[in-house]
Image (cartoon, coloured by chain):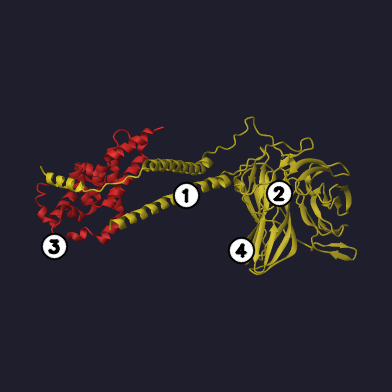
Chain colours: A yellow, B red
Amino acid sequence: MSGEQLRDELRRIAEGAPAVHVPGDTFDRGRRAARRARIAAAVVTVGCLALLAAIVVPLVRTPTPPVADGRPALGVPNRLYATPAGVRREQPGATGVTVAAAVLVDESGNPTLVDAADGSYHPLDVSLRSETQHTGSSYLTDLPIALSPDGRTLAWAWLDDLGNKARTGLRILDLTGGSHHDVPLTFETGAALIPRTLRWSPNGRRLAWSGYRVKQWTSTTIDIGGSWAGALGADDARSTFAQVPEPVIESGGGATGGDVPFDAAVSDTGDLAVVSGNLLLWKGDRTRFPAPANATLTGLRIVGGAVQATIGSRLVTLPGGDVRAVFPDAEPTDLGPLDQRRVLHLVGDGPREVQVVSARGPGRPTPIIKVDDGVAQVSLATDLMSLAQPTVTRPAPEWPWWTGRVTSLLVLAGLALAGLVVALGWAWRRRQRRRQRRRQRRAR
Amino acid sequence: MPDPSRNAFEQFVHARTPALTRTAYLLTGDAHLAEDLVQTALFKAARAWHRIDGDPEPYVRRILYTQNISWWRRRKVDETIGAPYDAAATAPDADLRLSLEAALAQLTRRQRSVLVLRYFEDLTEVQTGHVLGISAGTVKSTGREALARLRTLAPHLEELLEGVA
């Protein structure tokens, strides 16, 4: 039989095998290792599921079901929440909002659109805070944004810092159609204009702006000078430009500069009214009106062919300066008219509120909207509000976290678990190799 | 309260450790490595003891073979560089008469494993190839090379190898 002798000889050699000591705790160590392996498998499974959830959930997440009973009632919510940091931001034309109730700007200059149909919040991927660092100096500006009174068009200003020059313009977004177009605010010489205010006409078809011309914009110097204002239709590709005198308040023989009134409004027919200091430019006339040296202008609009301005706590008709109403708040922010006799004011410090106040004399203000602390700027769709029903009640917003904070957390958790498993595996392999080297040394 | 699984394991260890040690000794050719191999195989068996259905010996033996192969693969580079076995391809000193044990030590680990599994464990070529993770054809050729090497290293063992294919 082949190999029989070899087999016998191998058996003889095997008889010389040493007696092996098997540690008494082998079974216990084995059980503990099995338990550890089960725990590790569970951890890896949970990590994988977390990663899978982070990838799949946003894909299969169903949108909010439409309201079954026809078109939902449009309205402005009676509470406006501050947008928390870290939420997912959406492209302005892809929010699905066709009519907005409000646009809110937080203290970092990021706007959020509030849907008039369901009160949902849509943080926009837009920054209205432009901070430009130049050698030895920086230039910080908050660009304006305005929602049309009917809530169907949103306009905001943008600024591109190209290093040795700046480009600016207005972007006008038709929420109903989702399309937008840009209107450059750059002079033929290439100099840019930085918009400061933006106001819609009462019918929401025209826009007025005021701002300052950039005289010099280099890597080392920014020189802003020259006041300008203009108007354009919502569908126009270009704006008119009008240079206005430097905003100063002239009273008697002296003039006061600094942070003085400078704003522009446009009528439904396209007439531009500009207030620069205490000078009104209106229908070709330049008229000085009486104003205190520390006047602040928080509202400007054209009502029935007349210019109305909110200066300090007073509603005045320009250029005469007739006081139509004295408001209880010292410096309310005018958000527009509710009707012919009433206006909407944003008042208070920290958590604020929107009030309905009479535009025809003294009256008790009626609070209608609570505005959270953290909302720096509010623009309302005033056409959706009436005295009978100024606001509607909406549920608290569900912030779009999924591809933002929650997804990031899930991905981080998954990666952390994967890293832990890899680290443990590496440590185990290293230990095994050390043991292996010890065995080899002993064997030699 | 006595644990039946622990008792069964300890009885198995007590009864089968000597036989396992013999196989491990032949596979490794070294007392220390054999001891490590048996301890490792029994530890892995303890870890999976609750899953073993029936006679645990085939399971433990399979761990023994695969663990040895695993060590062999891990040390393959070192052995290739040092080549203590393969360097012995030169003709042996005529005065040096090697025993089979010493001649086995001159083989590569794969060659020795094939010989042990085929002629000590009585596995077929297919079973051997399955355990070592190689094809049956490779088992056959490796076995042939191993025997040729033994004949070269220790011609006086020709009688021992007589009839071995």
Q: Nearer the viewer, residue A148 or A64?
A: A64
Q: Is residue A160 left or right of residue A344?
A: left
Q: Badge 1 is on which residue?
A: A420
Residue beneath disc 2: A374
Q: Residues within 10 Å of mark 2 (few under 14, many from 20)?
A: some
User: Which residue does the numbered mark 3 point to in the structure image?
Assistant: B93
Determine which of the numbered discs, if any, sits on residue A162 in the image. Answer: 4
Callout 3 amino acid? Asp
Judge if badges 1 and 3 mark residues of a common chain: no
Dots 1, 3 in contact, CB < 8 A:
no
Distance from disc 2 to disc 1, alpha carbons, whole Å, reads 39 Å
Q: In the picture, residue A120 is in which quadrant?
A: top right
Question: How far is the residue under mark 4 from the one under mark 1?
Answer: 45 Å
User: Could you tell me which chain the residue with mark 2 belongs to?
Assistant: A
> Between disc 4 and disc 1, whose residue precedes?
4
Q: Is the C terminus of chain A in the top left, top right, bottom left or bottom right quadrant? A: bottom left
Q: Say whether residue A59 is left or right of residue A79.
A: left
Residue type for callout 4: Leu
Q: Which of marks 2 and 3 is in front?
A: 3
